[in-house]
Amino acid sequence: MNVKKTAFARGLLGIPLGIAIGFMISLFVSLGLGTGEYYSARPELIAEMGSELNAVLLQTGLSALVGMAFSAASVIWQLEDWSLAKQTGIYFLITALVMLPIAWFARWTERTLLGIAIYFGIFVVIFIVIWGIQYLIWRQKIKKMNEKL
């Protein structure tokens, strides 16, 4: 497997996925607020960018970067000569280093030390939950494959 080539291809495929997830999050937030309005971006971002269109353009680009980074970094899980701990640590480091600045620029987090700490804490919890679910799924699949042997 050519790691760089695979990461690049996955990164490109992750762009529309990131945009779609970003849109779905804004849709679910709007539904959750229950006002009947669609909130395309945080009001702070709209004010900072000077218009809703500029805010949505920036947010869409940042969502594309998130999708690209997460997808490209997924190649790490196929590096069989790395331990699971190393794969997890490197994947976490890459995704956290991408998410935190993007969250800052998109105003998904408050621009305070406390806001960043809370956002990072939420990121860690979500990462652990998703990692744990994936681990259990793969453990079950491996158990079934071993039973067939």
Image (spheres, grey):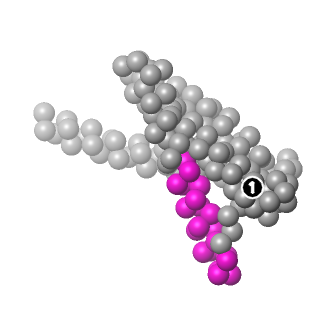
Magenta-drawn segment: 18-37
Pick whichever, 76 or 104, lies toward us. Answer: 104
In the picture, the quarter occupied by the C terminus is: top left
In this image, 41 relative to 91: left or right? right
Q: Is residue 79 above or below residue 54?
A: above
x%, y% of residue 1? Answer: 36, 19
Q: Is residue 53 magenta?
A: no
x%, y% of residue 84? Answer: 46, 29
**Residue 147, picture quadrant:** top left
Q: Residue at x 47, y 27 (%)?
A: 7
How many residues crowd mark 1 within 10 Å: few (<14), some (14–19), many (20+)?
many
x%, y% of residue 85? Answer: 51, 29
Q: Residue at x 62, y 32 (%)?
A: 93
Q: Is residue 67 above or below residue 46?
A: above
**Would residue 74 be seen by someone viewing this image from the given angle?**
no
Circle count: 1
Main secondary structure type of the part rendered in magenta: helix
Pick whichever, 135 or 12, lies toward us. Answer: 12
Pick whichever, 98 or 10, lies toward us. Answer: 10
Amino acid, disc 1? Ala
Q: Residue at x 65, y 81 (%)?
A: 36
Q: Residue at x 55, y 61 (%)?
A: 24
Badge 1 element: helix
x%, y% of residue 134? Answer: 41, 45
Outermost residue on the left side: it is 149
Q: Is residue 130 above or below residue 94?
A: below
**Would residue 143 be seen by someone viewing this image from the given angle?**
yes
Q: Is residue 79 above or below residue 105?
A: above
Give the residue number, with chain letter if any, for mark 1: 55
In this image, 56 relative to 70: left or right? right
Pick whichever, 115 or 30, lies toward us. Answer: 30
